[in-house]
Image (spheres, rainbow, N blue to C red):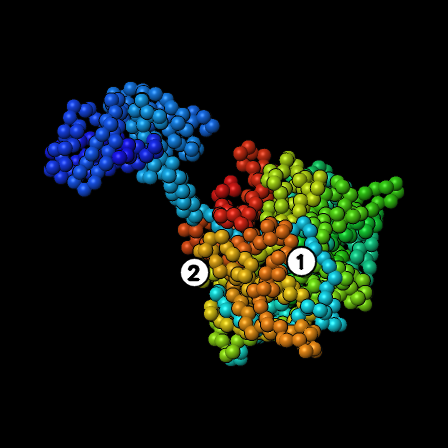
């Protein structure tokens, strides 16, 4: 027998309707179709009872037993959740009489998920005042709590599905850094030590996404990936897996940012470089004693089509405005005459960041005076860092622009819309005699120094806080200050991290003489042969989409922080290195960068193929960012031989685990597996995902090779267990779960992976160019101060890589308004 509420009995049908009390949790109404004999019994047992009513019941075959019918009638109640989240209650109201019955705490009615208690409003409560709990729920499959939990999950999934078209997954994420590195002496290269192993194994790579073949691959010869390239990829995974140092890391790096629109004070003057060293460091500048902004049309009339930075013009003294305009600058009237030749010098700059006045393009012109200023060493250092961030200084930019590498002062045409303006100086990071720049002057007694240099009225500044006098020690703001100190590359060959002990340590940043660097280097214990296909592989020529340049200056992604507040009034956007949240303590870098495994082939258009708007520049010429490349298909297999010498068993285990990751990394959800590596180029585009299988492992010890001892039987599993056993708990506990998530094939939905899109997914078609603009997202997440309330732009962080949902909201142009 079990307790039920008998809801109704229809002897004509004959149907008995009831619900299990289920300890108060209730359930859904059951309808029992009775046989004719049973119907007579039921009618007899329920004679004179007003339903619904609690009773004990048992139904088996044709027999229905009803017993212990409660003397109290059950009231069918409508339910309304009320009260604060921490004190949820239900108001029960008699459905028939529409009268309040009682208000009961949610807990007393068996609801533990009070946050979702509202969902229960669509159920009925069968109230029986003589019971504890006072009745049960009706209409909830499996009882109230299970039903609410299921509703919660469905809601969340629906919400995610509903929102999915508005969300994307960034192609990369970061695995956190460990705080400590365990260093010790490596095995050495002279003797095979006792218990240490030498040997070899074969690795078979099988690609699960298309593989970007190295330059020069033909399709008629076997496909060959240089051993050094594989070694680099395996080493990067090993560093994370084993807790190694940051070998490929530019500790001196400091980003630079575009200036924000603001009026510069009178201490900023135009100047002409007077003297420079043989390698382009300016020593003194001639200062201009007056600056006037002149319309490009007037300048072209005076100088012709050859108008360029350094062109000389004449302006009549009487035409110089006496006061600056609302933009804070003096503009020459369009009626004023400008002549060619004279004591004024022109600075031609890019149209990119300048303030535009409707229809007219103004250029800064300065009257060259007689005063000179010395350029400080600090100003030069700051300028160098700022210059590195410019488009002109991006790797390969000069080559793509076809500049003569011997030309010290290359120029580039500037256009305003379709209208040619003149020629600007290309940023080379060097300054030569005759270059025109802005300088911030500082007067100290009789001498004037140029304490800051700038190539335009609005230019760039390094990611540091000048208020803290960084010029004397800029390294205090560098990348090296933003990682746990122990992680900086090994420099003592007698004390190496687990990765350098196996792969070797070459001091990448050696600034000392070559000999000294070589002394500090330690040769590796592992050698990689080239990875080759057995047969020629048919290649497909593609136009590869542009790869986004890494921008560690994008602090919202690259830095670790808990405070995502935007800047206060007048403050630098908080994404910037050197903005206010950085002053107490430098915000650390987020971790090691990894790309999700996300096959682009399932996307339309596929993420790795250049879109039409990327293939051509606005002027119709072929874009230099799109390159023709060869693609090997999914399923391509490469094999290579790896040899090693003088490794401990645990070191060999770590090496093997860096290939066969599944031996140590197990995705929590089986559907997320397997764990994969990346080989070859195009990782950001989802290319080169692959599995590795180790076969034919052979090992020998000193005793087995040179003595009479029996040959060592290789046991990869045992070596890996020794590696895992020796691996610090911090690495296994804090790093491996994140590493597993980023290396598992199915952690993210590959269809959602893209550089931050500028349109929702359904609008991609037909609006691809706008869709491909990450600008809106990075602006909206920049931590910039905005005057209007409710329009702030807090930092948006990448999700924890081990988290369930990796998606971020898409930001469109209209969302910024
Ligand atoms: Zn190291």
Q: Which mark is residue 135?
A: none
Q: Which mark is residue 602?
A: 2
Between 815 and 414, the one lying in front of the other is 815
Q: Which mark is residue 244?
A: 1
Q: Is residue 9 left or right of residue 297?
A: left
Q: Is residue 188 left or right of residue 614?
A: right
Q: In which quarter of the image is residue 301?
A: bottom right
Q: Which of marks 2 and 1 is nearer the N terminus?
A: 1
**202 relative to 350, above or below:** below
**530 relative to 444, above or below:** below
Between 519 and 428, the one lying in front of the other is 519
Q: Which residue is drawn at 39% across and 27% down?
A: 108
- In the rendered image, residue 165, in percent from the top left (x then y), is placed at 43, 48
Which marked residue is nearer to the observer: mark 2 or mark 1?
A: 1
Q: Which residue is drawn at 55% across and 52% down?
A: 737
> Could you tell me how far apart the alpha carbons at marks 2 and 1 are, in whole angstroms?
35 Å
**546 relative to 635, above or below:** above
Between 6 and 784, the one lying in front of the other is 6
- In the rendered image, residue 85, in percent from the top left (x then y), is placed at 46, 29
Mark 2 and mark 1 residues within 8 Å of each other at the beta carbon: no
- Inspect this view and state whether residue 700 appears: yes
- In the rendered image, residue 260, in percent from the top left (x then y), is placed at 64, 43
**605 relative to 359, above or below:** below
- Indicate if the residue with disc 1 has its beta carbon within 8 Å of ligand 1: yes
Q: What element carries label 2?
A: helix
Between 416 and 610, the one lying in front of the other is 610
Q: In which quarter of the image is residue 487?
A: bottom right
Q: Residue at x 49, y 73 (%)?
A: 539
Count residues near mark 2 (Cα–Cα under 10 Å), then give few for <14, some for 14-19, many for 20+.
few
- Inspect this view and state whether residue 421 appears: no
Q: In this view, does 450 lie to the left or right of 751?
A: right
């Amino acid at each position: 027998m079990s307790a039920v509420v008998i809801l109704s009995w229809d002897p004509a049908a004959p149907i008995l309707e009831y619900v299990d009390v289920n300890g108060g949790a209730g359930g859904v109404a059951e309808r029992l179709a009775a046989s004719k004999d049973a119907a007579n019994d039921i009618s007899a047992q329920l004679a004179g009872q007003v339903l619904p009513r609690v009773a004990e019941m048992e139904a088996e075959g044709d027999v229905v037993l009803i017993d212990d019918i409660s003397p109290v009638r059950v009231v069918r109640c409508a339910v309304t959740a009320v009260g604060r989240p921490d004190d949820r209650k239900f108001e029960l109201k008699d459905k028939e009489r529409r009268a309040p019955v009682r208000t009961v705490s949610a807990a007393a009615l068996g609801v533990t998920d009070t946050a979702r208690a509202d969902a229960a409003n669509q159920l009925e409560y069968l109230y029986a005042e003589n019971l504890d709990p006072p009745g049960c729920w009706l209409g909830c499959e499996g009882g109230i709590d299970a039903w609410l939990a299921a509703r919660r999950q469905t809601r969340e999934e629906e919400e995610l599905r509903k929102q999915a078209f508005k969300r994307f997954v960034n192609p990369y994420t970061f695995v956190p850094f460990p705080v400590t590195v365990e260093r010790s002496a490596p095995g050495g290269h002279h003797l095979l030590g006792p218990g240490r192993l030498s040997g070899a194994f074969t690795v078979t790579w099988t690609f699960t996404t298309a593989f970007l073949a190295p330059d020069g691959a033909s399709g008629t010869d076997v496909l060959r990936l240089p051993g050094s390239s594989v070694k680099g990829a395996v080493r990067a995974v090993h560093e994370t897996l084993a807790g190694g140092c940051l070998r490929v890391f530019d500790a001196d790096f400091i980003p630079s940012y575009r200036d924000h629109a603001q009026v510069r004070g009178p201490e900023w003057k135009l100047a002409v470089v007077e003297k420079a060293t043989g390698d382009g460091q300016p020593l003194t500048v001639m200062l201009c004693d007056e600056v006037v902004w002149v319309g490009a049309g007037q300048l072209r009339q005076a100088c012709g089509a050859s108008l360029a930075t350094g062109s000389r013009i004449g302006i009549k003294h009487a035409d110089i405005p006496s006061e600056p305009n609302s933009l804070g600058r003096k503009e020459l009237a369009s009626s004023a005459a400008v002549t060619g030749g004279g004591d004024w010098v022109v600075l031609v700059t890019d149209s990119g960041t300048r303030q535009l006045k409707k229809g007219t393009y103004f250029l800064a012109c300065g009257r060259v005076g007689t005063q000179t200023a010395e350029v400080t060493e600090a100003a030069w250092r700051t300028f160098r860092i700022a210059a590195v961030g410019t488009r002109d200084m991006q790797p390969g930019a000069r080559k793509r622009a076809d500049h003569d590498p011997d030309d010290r002062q290359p120029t580039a045409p500037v256009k305003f819309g379709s209208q040619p303006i003149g020629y600007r100086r290309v940023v080379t990071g060097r300054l030569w005699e005759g270059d025109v720049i802005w300088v911030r002057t500082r007067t100290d007694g009789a001498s004037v120094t140029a304490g800051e240099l700038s190539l335009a009225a609005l230019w760039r500044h390094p990611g540091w806080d000048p208020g803290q006098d960084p010029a004397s020690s800029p390294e205090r703001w560098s990348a090296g200050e933003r990682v746990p100190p122990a992680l900086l590359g090994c420099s003592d060959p007698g004390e190496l991290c687990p990765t350098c002990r196996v792969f070797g340590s070459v001091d990448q940043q050696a600034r000392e003489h070559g000999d000294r660097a070589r002394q500090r280097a330690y040769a590796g214990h592992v050698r990689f042969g080239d990875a080759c296909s057995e047969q020629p592989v048919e290649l497909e020529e593609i136009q590869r989409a542009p790869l986004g340049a890494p921008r560690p200056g994008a602090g919202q992604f690259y830095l670790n922080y808990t405070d995502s507040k935007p800047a206060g009034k007048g403050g630098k956007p908080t994404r910037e290195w050197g903005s206010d949240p950085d002053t107490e303590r430098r915000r650390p870098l987020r971790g090691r960068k990894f790309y999700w495994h996300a096959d682009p082939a399932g996307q339309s258009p596929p993420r790795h193929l250049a879109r039409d708007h990327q293939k051509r520049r606005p002027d119709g010429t072929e874009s230099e960012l799109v390159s023709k490349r060869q693609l090997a298909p999914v399923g391509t297999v490469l094999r290579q031989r790896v040899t090693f010498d003088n490794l401990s068993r645990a070191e060999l285990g770590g090496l093997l685990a860096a290939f066969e990751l599944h031996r140590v990394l197990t995705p929590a959800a089986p559907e997320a597996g397997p764990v994969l590596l990346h080989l070859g180029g195009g990782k950001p585009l989802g290319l080169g995902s692959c599995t590795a299988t180790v076969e034919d492992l052979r090992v020998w010890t000193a005793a087995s090779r040179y003595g009479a001892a029996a040959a060592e039987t290789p046991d990869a599993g045992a070596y890996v267990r020794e590696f895992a056993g020796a691996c610090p708990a911090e690495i296994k506990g804090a790093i491996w779960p994140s590493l597993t998530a980023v290396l598992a094939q199915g952690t993210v939905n590959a269809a959602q992976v893209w550089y931050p899109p500028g349109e929702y997914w359904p609008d991609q078609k037909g609006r691809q160019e706008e869709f491909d603009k990450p600008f809106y997202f990075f602006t909206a997440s920049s931590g910039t101060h905005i005057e209007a309330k409710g329009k702030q732009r807090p930092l948006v962080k990448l999700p924890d890589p081990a988290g369930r949902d990796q998606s971020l909201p898409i930001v469109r142009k209209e969302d910024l308004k």
